[in-house]
Amino acid sequence: MTLRICILLIIALMLAACGGEPTPEVVSFVPSPTEGAKVPTRAPTNTATPTVETSTPTLTPTNTDTPTPTASPTPSIPVAQAIRAISIRVGPASNYPVMGTLEANAQLPIVGISEDGNWYQVQLEDGTFGWVTAATTQVETFGDLRVIEVALAPTDTPTFTPTATDTPTSTPTETATPTPTATPTHTPTDTPTATPTATPRPIETPNARPDSINTDDQAAILASFGIAEDNGEEADFVEETTVDLTGEDDLLRWESFEGEFSDFVVSATIHWGPGAEEDYCGFRFRGAGTENLYIVDIDRDGGLYFEYKLDNEWQEIVEGDGRNINTDQDDTNQLVLIAVGNTFSVYLNGEFAGELIDDTLPSGEVALLAGTYDESDETNCVFEDAWIWTLETSPFNQALAPREISYGDTVNGTIDDSASGAYFTFDGRQGDFVGIRMTKTSGDLDPYLILLDANGTTLIENDDDPQGFNRDAYLRDYVLPATGTYTVLATRFQETTGTSSGDYTLTLELVRPGDGGLTGGGIPIAIGDTIEGTIGGTAARVRYTLTANDGDVVTIQMRRASGDLDALLIVLDENGVQVAGNDDDPFGNTRDAAINGLPLNAGTYTIVATRFQEDVGLTSGDFTLTIEREN
């Protein structure tokens, strides 16, 4: 079969500093502000017009000087400096949630190192701790790393820090590492919480793909994915081809298979040629010119990466697991990519190594790709037994097809290694207050919930309900930002790499219907008021709306008047974000709830008067709610 050869050179070398991002020893790319098909920091900085196998002339590369980072004095405490913007994660692996970003050239002190040496634990400006990769292509360190001790990865616990309760009961006190018990206790939570921000990122999502595949031949690979012989056909085959970049600095080049593809499997054995460890080989796929494309590649530095460019803008880099890469000069690696719908999964030497989720580009070219950096000298990538199989139907429809649910629905599901999660879609209106609860019903399942908007952007996620007594997940009182279709990803802690399993129920609640705005819907209450209410039966909560002026400071008290009610107070801003909450009055010795000295901005707040464990709580009774001004 014939191949069409496309050449792409990229302009404007991004400044390298030192940075890091979590995952097994990997490197990430940073988009350049200039035109080009690939713009990672480790990527090309020259630009040329893509060419096909005709005689279309190419532009002469115009190199730009790369400023040398200014050396920093050796600090007494070692620091990590980002070469490019990288993610800061909760733990030392790419499957831990992202908690922030270390911008290019920014520094953070190193306070620990992971057991495998691939991650640094760093201290953020607010005193909290996170993890960044130790890959030298992403971060540069200053100081003596020999003084850094090994730090352990966090457990799958809630992010709040429990404190002892003053409730005069014989229930045990919750510790910083809660485990499910038959007689849980609850903890006062009186600290306002930070406003979460939307995080547009491709996320690793569970599916029914295998953890490993048989790479003996094409038939074995297809069978590993459950692809029947009549499901599509081989579209192109290349016995051997060399993508030669000798003397071509900062260059990206690819050779395209014949045709355009949507769902497919592509495979190649990659033989490292001469060149620097940072030079890379892989696939370009669903490409559409130079402004829209996806890329997956590996390098001899042990890095596996997904990069993607949409509307000429590079998106956040997604790192895979490169620990299985054979990195010696003459080694070979078997790279397999399966693209189904919006999900692209890569297998490295037969093992699952990473996944990208994005639905922007539905189809396009697929190509064998190679890239270089500065001073490439002699370098090339040799591709052997490269083939592409086009799919007519998805072999993973059962796992990937979302189920439609509506407000008030409760559905059942199962999490295990063959299907580590499921999608559920629902239609909502701007201003709807929703609650989404995922409850384990069997096994050792540790539920995890993620809510996505219509563009696949992560809006909010939860591992352990901070007001719950076990590992069940609950997205509580979230206000939908727009009218449209939302997707709930019901999975487990650490998603595809997690080990827990079992049955679950998923419940979608409409807590308050939207009216096109984000406020209203509760019983009006003003500063200075005392109002009565009842919690019991199906009435697990009562909502009140408070209009505040800028600078108001208030104390809110919820006192039991009858029954065994264990009061719980939650305050939400007009976006539905929790700003304060309390279970037991920190200055009292009862189960009454109080939020003391809460500063408010101008706007409408929702006060939720409820009980410990809310819907699943068992206490009930009458109460009084009082709001007093403190200033």
Image (cartoon, rainbow, N blue to C red):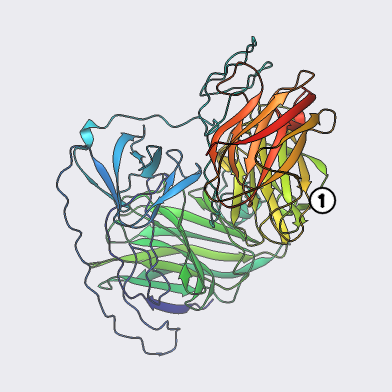
Out of 452 and 149, give the one closest to the viewer. Answer: 452
Residue 533 vs residue 516, the one in the foreground: 533
Q: Residue at x 77, y 41 (%)?
A: 507
Q: Position of residue 542 (x, y in %)?
A: 76, 37
Q: Which residue ends up furthest to the right in the rendered image?
A: 537
Query: From this viewpoint, which residue is outermost toward the top?
Result: 170
Quarter of image, res 466: top right
545 relative to 28, above or below: above
48 over 314 or under it: above or below:
below
The answer to whether 563 appears left or right of 612 in the picture is right
Q: Residues within 10 Å of mark 1 (few under 14, many from 20)?
A: some
Q: Residue at x 60, y 16 (%)?
A: 589
- The answer to whether residue 421 is seen in the rendering is no
User: Which residue lies under the disc numbered 1?
Assistant: 406
Could you tell me how many numbered marks the image carries?
Answer: 1
Work out which quarter of the rendered image holds the N terminus and state it: bottom right
Name which quarter of the figure residue 506 lies in.
top right
Residue 120: % across, % down? 34, 40
**Location of residue 286 in the rendering, given as x and y in whole percent from the top left corner:** 56, 70
Amino acid type, callout 1: Ser
Q: Provide residue 365's location: percent of width, then percent of height.
A: 55, 73
Residue 86 appearing in the image: yes
Hey, which residue is sitting farthest left in the picture?
73
57 shown above or below 104: below
Say if 119 sits above or below 201 in the image: above
Horizontal relation, residue 58 to residue 626: left or right: left
Q: Give 446 or 363, whichever is nearer the viewer.
A: 446
Mark 1: secondary structure? loop
